Amino acid sequence: MVVPRPFAAVALRILLLGAPLPLSGQGGMSGMTGMDMGREIVIPSGALYTRADVEFMQGMIAHHAQAIVMTRMAAAHAANPQVLKLAQKIDQSQMPEIILMQKWLRRYGQYAPDTSSWHHVRMAGMLTDEQLAALDAAQGVDFDRAFLQGMIQHHAGALKMVDDLFASPRAGQDVDVNVFANDVVTAQTGEIGIMRRLLSQLPAK
């Protein structure tokens, strides 16, 4: 089993400078607001997973879904080839992870939100409606800059969610949750480094 590590320091160091997807799905944790999960979370006696694990998976579905909305703007907003390639990589990695999280939740009889859930919940790092509107209004270099800044913020929020998970008593002991959470940290920390480099290469305003 992957050994959980505290990620608060990492998240703080890399924290920046804050239409539903046409996808199918079945629709307490700190930072989760405005979301009606539609079903009370009941943890069976003796279960290895905890309420924090369930809320983490539910919240991360919404978090990933908003990221995919952002990535799918890139092609239509004249993103440069490197930004477009990164956006496609994020899309192609996070959509399968949404399916993985939904399957995990259903296996344990928990509510599995669909990809429209980002409209009703704001987890750490997720963009506001105003930020999304500004991103959608941008083109070319302005889009590249807004996308990279917004996605760095978004990824830093995901690291905060992992940190909160492992700070919760007995959370993260389920093998699937543990491996997934650590994979989020590995992948998104690396992508933040790439995005910071791309951001530094953009023309000055």
Image: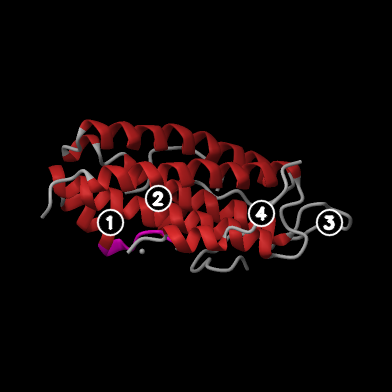
Q: Which of marks 4 and 3 is nearer the N terminus?
A: 4
- x, y (%) of residue 185? 55, 47
| Residue neighbourhood size for the residue with mark 1, other residues' Cα within 10 Å, grouped as few (<14), some (14–19), many (≥20) | some
Give the CA separation, mark 1 to mark 2.
9 Å
Identify which residue is drawn at 25% across, 47% down. Answer: 199
Q: Do the residues labelled 3 and 2 touch (CB within 8 Å)?
A: no
Q: Which of marks 4 and 1 is nearer the N terminus?
A: 4
Highlighted range, magenta = 123-130
Q: Residue 44 carries which label?
A: 3
Say left or right for 57 vs 12: right
From this viewpoint, which residue is outermost toward the right? 46
Residue 99: name its quadrant.
top right
Residue bearing the label numbered 4: 5
Q: Which of marks 1 and 3 is nearer the N terminus?
A: 3
| Residue neighbourhood size for the residue with mark 3, other residues' Cα within 10 Å, grouped as few (<14), some (14–19), many (≥20) | few
Say left or right for 139 vs 166: left
Q: Earlier in the sequence, mark 3 or mark 2?
A: 3
Q: Quadrant of the C terminus?
A: bottom left
Give the CA separation, mark 3 to mark 2.
31 Å
Identify which residue is drawn at 71% across, 61% down. Answer: 51
Residue bearing the label numbered 1: 132
